[in-house]
Amino acid sequence: MPELPEVETIRRWLQDGRQGEGGILGCSFTTVEVLWERSLAIPARDVFQQCLAGQTVMQIGRRGKFLLLELTGGWMLFHLRMSGDLRVESQLEPTHPHDRMVFNFSDGRRLVFNDARKFGRVWLVEDPLEITGNLGPEPLDPAFTPHWLYDRLCTFNRRLKPLLLDQTFLAGLGNIYTDEALFHARLHPLTLSSMLSAADAYGLWHAIRQVLQEGIDHHGASIDWVYRGGDFQNYFAVYKQTGRPCQNCGKAIERLVVGQRSTHFCPYCQPVRKK
DNA sequence: ACGAGCGCCTGTCGGC
DNA sequence: TGCCGACAGGCGCTCG
């Protein structure tokens, strides 16, 4: 579900807090409840609960769509997948439907992992690279350059949409931001990566960073019942805009299915590139 | 190398 | 009203 901007938004409020509520830096775990067994990837439940007790949250990071909590001895990783969410609240609050894990803190608050569709996962590991080691670069990192992108696009002969969704190619893009980035770069989602010119690659590089930064600036997108306060959904150019006029040319936005994913684009502004 | 299909899950929405 | 299929922000797996 959440893509890079949504995960980054959650990371920031876990770190800094929001609406007068403090973040969770420096908080120590007392007990942990695992309400849905399969939400826990590794280790086994009893080891997980024993290891976490007494540990303190030192740093909160993000790698692609993974949320990383650095603890006194180890790392806890969250992947929210389609419907996962995290909230911080008093232990006196009533629990919600679909709460899958509850992490109680010694200060009377708790961190709750809620996940209706049960696709999300939690890991407790010594080294986060065990889980995130095969991810591609961070799109907002200086190491992600137009030259790197052009080089890698030429290496493959894949359709742009599935390639950009491939987390080992680039970490953090999901269905929404991929469609938005391709629109702003004026590239058709079915264009083969090896067909792009250096100028195309530069435009794509810029569009990817722009849509992700705008998403973060808007605190992510809130869709359907997964509401986190972000409002980037009001600024979608193509995602879920099928039939509505393109903001550039006025022609109707179209939808097609690529790699079993809903894909939205302007057929006029995003022609397939041929060499 | 690459892509299609499927499994994992629950909830919502539109059509009949 | 009730049922039923399509669809949903993701990803790992097998198979061809």
Image (spheres, coloured by chain):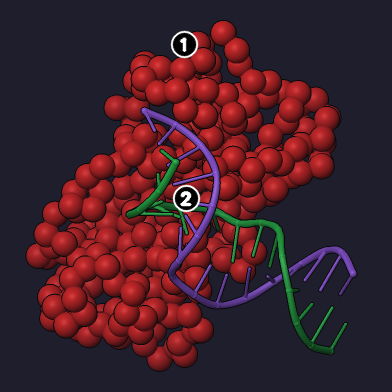
Chain colours: A red, B purple, C green
Residue picked out by circle 1: A198
User: In the picture shown, does residue A237 fall above or below A33?
Assistant: above
User: 10 Å neighbourhood of mark 2: few (<14), some, or many (≥20)?
Assistant: many
Kindly identify the residue that appears in the image at 36 percent across and 20 percent down.
A155
Front residue of B15 and A72: B15
Q: Secondary structure at mark 1?
A: helix
Image location of residue A270, percent across then percent down = 67, 24
Q: Position of residue A77 (x, y in %)?
A: 27, 61
Task: Give residue A261's position: percent from left, percent from top.
Answer: 58, 47
Query: Which chain is indicated by disc 2?
Result: A
Residue A257: quarter of image? top right
Between A162 and A115, which is closer to the camera in this rendering?
A162
Q: Is residue A8 above or below residue A186?
A: below
Q: What amino acid is at disc 2?
A: Glu
**Residue name at image x 38 percent, y 42 percent:** A167
Residue at (61, 69) in percent of width and height: A225
- Tell me residue A240's x, y (percent): 70, 48
Quadrant housing residue A70: bottom left
Q: Is residue A5 visible?
A: no
- From the image, tell me which residue sits under label 2: A3
Instruction: Tell if the residue under mark 2 belongs to the same chain as the one under mark 1.
Output: yes
Work out how far the residue at label 2 is from the one at label 1, CA to CA, in angstroms. 27 Å
* Tally of numbered discs: 2
Give the quadrant of the C terminus of chain A.
top right
Residue under the point 21% across and 68% down: A42
